[in-house]
Amino acid sequence: MASRMDIRTGKRRIWCLTGVGVIIVVAGVCLLAGYQRKAFAERTHCVGNLVHLRLAKVVCQKELGLADGDPIPDKTLIKCLAMDLGQSDRLKCPSGGTYLVGNAGITPKCSYTNICYTYSFDVSHLRLNRRAWKHSLEP
Protein backbone atom coordinates (compact mmCIF):
# COMPACT_ATOMS: atom_id res chain seq x y z
CA MET A 1 0.00 0.00 0.00
CA ALA A 2 2.82 2.37 0.83
CA SER A 3 4.48 1.78 -2.52
CA ARG A 4 1.30 2.85 -4.35
CA MET A 5 1.28 6.10 -2.44
CA ASP A 6 4.92 6.69 -3.36
CA ILE A 7 4.15 6.11 -7.06
CA ARG A 8 1.20 8.53 -6.98
CA THR A 9 3.25 11.13 -5.15
CA GLY A 10 6.06 10.73 -7.69
CA LYS A 11 3.62 11.16 -10.60
CA ARG A 12 2.15 14.26 -8.98
CA ARG A 13 5.60 15.75 -8.57
CA ILE A 14 6.42 15.07 -12.21
CA TRP A 15 3.17 16.67 -13.35
CA CYS A 16 3.75 19.68 -11.09
CA LEU A 17 7.29 20.13 -12.40
CA THR A 18 6.03 19.80 -15.98
CA GLY A 19 3.37 22.43 -15.29
CA VAL A 20 5.91 24.80 -13.78
CA GLY A 21 8.19 24.26 -16.78
CA VAL A 22 5.38 25.07 -19.21
CA ILE A 23 4.53 28.24 -17.28
CA ILE A 24 8.17 29.36 -17.37
CA VAL A 25 8.40 28.75 -21.14
CA VAL A 26 5.16 30.64 -21.82
CA ALA A 27 6.32 33.56 -19.64
CA GLY A 28 9.65 33.65 -21.49
CA VAL A 29 7.94 33.70 -24.88
CA CYS A 30 5.64 36.52 -23.73
CA LEU A 31 8.60 38.57 -22.46
CA LEU A 32 10.52 38.02 -25.71
CA ALA A 33 7.49 39.05 -27.78
CA GLY A 34 7.07 42.22 -25.69
CA TYR A 35 10.74 43.11 -26.10
CA GLN A 36 10.52 42.52 -29.85
CA ARG A 37 7.46 44.77 -30.16
CA LYS A 38 9.14 47.57 -28.22
CA ALA A 39 12.44 47.38 -30.14
CA PHE A 40 10.67 47.21 -33.50
CA ALA A 41 8.40 50.14 -32.62
CA GLU A 42 11.42 52.26 -31.62
CA ARG A 43 13.21 51.34 -34.84
CA THR A 44 10.12 52.17 -36.95
CA HIS A 45 9.73 55.54 -35.18
CA CYS A 46 13.40 56.36 -35.79
CA VAL A 47 13.22 55.44 -39.49
CA GLY A 48 10.09 57.59 -39.82
CA ASN A 49 12.02 60.54 -38.37
CA LEU A 50 14.85 59.88 -40.83
CA VAL A 51 12.33 59.98 -43.69
CA HIS A 52 11.06 63.38 -42.47
CA LEU A 53 14.64 64.65 -42.31
CA ARG A 54 15.37 63.39 -45.82
CA LEU A 55 12.23 65.02 -47.24
CA ALA A 56 13.02 68.33 -45.50
CA LYS A 57 16.55 68.21 -46.93
CA VAL A 58 15.16 67.66 -50.44
CA VAL A 59 12.77 70.62 -50.04
CA CYS A 60 15.62 72.83 -48.77
CA GLN A 61 17.88 71.73 -51.60
CA LYS A 62 15.24 72.62 -54.21
CA GLU A 63 14.31 75.95 -52.55
CA LEU A 64 17.92 77.10 -52.29
CA GLY A 65 19.13 75.52 -55.52
CA LEU A 66 21.90 73.60 -53.77
CA ALA A 67 24.02 70.97 -55.48
CA ASP A 68 24.70 67.59 -53.91
CA GLY A 69 27.28 67.94 -51.15
CA ASP A 70 26.51 71.59 -50.36
CA PRO A 71 25.79 72.35 -46.69
CA ILE A 72 22.18 73.11 -45.77
CA PRO A 73 21.70 76.09 -43.42
CA ASP A 74 20.25 75.01 -40.08
CA LYS A 75 17.58 77.73 -40.04
CA THR A 76 16.25 76.68 -43.44
CA LEU A 77 16.18 73.01 -42.45
CA ILE A 78 14.32 73.83 -39.22
CA LYS A 79 11.84 75.92 -41.23
CA CYS A 80 11.23 73.04 -43.65
CA LEU A 81 10.77 70.60 -40.78
CA ALA A 82 8.36 73.00 -39.08
CA MET A 83 6.29 73.19 -42.27
CA ASP A 84 6.20 69.39 -42.49
CA LEU A 85 5.71 68.43 -38.83
CA GLY A 86 4.45 71.60 -37.19
CA GLN A 87 7.51 71.61 -34.92
CA SER A 88 11.03 70.37 -35.38
CA ASP A 89 11.93 69.37 -31.83
CA ARG A 90 9.98 66.10 -32.07
CA LEU A 91 12.69 64.45 -34.13
CA LYS A 92 14.46 62.42 -31.47
CA CYS A 93 15.50 58.82 -31.67
CA PRO A 94 13.49 56.87 -29.08
CA SER A 95 16.49 54.61 -28.47
CA GLY A 96 18.76 57.51 -27.54
CA GLY A 97 20.62 58.00 -30.82
CA THR A 98 21.28 61.36 -32.44
CA TYR A 99 20.55 62.23 -36.03
CA LEU A 100 23.42 63.05 -38.37
CA VAL A 101 21.76 65.26 -40.99
CA GLY A 102 24.71 65.79 -43.34
CA ASN A 103 24.91 67.88 -46.49
CA ALA A 104 22.48 68.03 -49.39
CA GLY A 105 22.12 64.81 -51.34
CA ILE A 106 23.37 62.64 -48.46
CA THR A 107 20.97 60.35 -46.60
CA PRO A 108 20.55 61.29 -42.92
CA LYS A 109 21.68 58.69 -40.40
CA CYS A 110 21.04 57.75 -36.79
CA SER A 111 23.99 57.24 -34.44
CA TYR A 112 22.22 54.33 -32.70
CA THR A 113 24.19 51.29 -33.84
CA ASN A 114 22.45 48.43 -32.07
CA ILE A 115 20.43 46.01 -34.12
CA CYS A 116 17.01 44.77 -33.08
CA TYR A 117 15.97 41.28 -34.05
CA THR A 118 12.55 39.86 -34.70
CA TYR A 119 11.87 36.15 -34.69
CA SER A 120 9.22 34.14 -36.45
CA PHE A 121 8.54 30.42 -36.55
CA ASP A 122 8.37 28.91 -40.03
CA VAL A 123 5.91 26.05 -39.69
CA SER A 124 6.53 24.61 -43.16
CA HIS A 125 10.27 24.10 -42.49
CA LEU A 126 10.01 23.79 -38.69
CA ARG A 127 12.63 26.42 -37.95
CA LEU A 128 12.97 29.76 -36.22
CA ASN A 129 13.77 32.66 -38.55
CA ARG A 130 15.60 35.76 -37.33
CA ARG A 131 15.58 39.14 -39.06
CA ALA A 132 17.91 42.01 -38.19
CA TRP A 133 16.69 45.61 -38.24
CA LYS A 134 18.88 48.73 -38.12
CA HIS A 135 18.04 52.36 -37.47
CA SER A 136 18.81 53.29 -41.06
CA LEU A 137 17.19 54.18 -44.38
CA GLU A 138 19.74 52.10 -46.22
CA PRO A 139 18.77 48.47 -46.92
Image: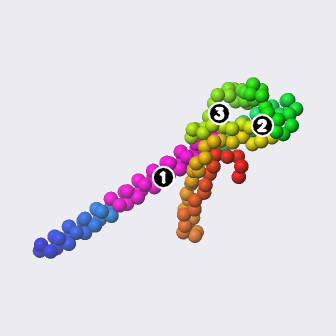
The quarter holding residue 66 reads top right
Judge the density around disc 3: few (<14), some (14-19), many (≥20) Cα neighbours within 10 Å. Answer: some
Judge the density around disc 2: few (<14), some (14-19), many (≥20) Cα neighbours within 10 Å. Answer: some
CA gap, disc 2 to disc 3? 18 Å
Which percent across, then down, holds residue 78?
72, 27
Which percent across, then down, holds residue 48?
67, 40
Can residue 80 be seen in this snapshot?
no
Residue type marked 3 = Leu
Q: Residue at x 55, y 46 (%)?
A: 39
Q: Residue at x 80, y 40 (%)?
A: 105
Residue type marked 1 = Leu
Span shown in magenta: 20-46
| Drawn side of residue 11 relative to residue 137, left or right | left
Q: Secondary structure at mark 2?
A: loop
Do the numbered discs 2 and 3 sit on residues whose CB atoms are within 8 Å? no
| Drawn side of residue 56 relative to residue 132, left or right | right
The secondary structure that dominates the magenta segment is helix
Which percent across, then down, holds residue 129?
57, 62
Q: Which mark is residue 103?
A: 2
Q: Which mark is residue 32?
A: 1
Q: Which mark is residue 91?
A: 3
Q: Secondary structure at mark 1?
A: helix
Q: Residue at x 41, y 53 (%)?
A: 27
CA gap, disc 2 to disc 1? 39 Å
The quarter holding residue 103 reads top right
Q: Secondary structure at mark 3?
A: loop
Residue type marked 2 = Asn
Can residue 106 be seen in this snapshot?
yes
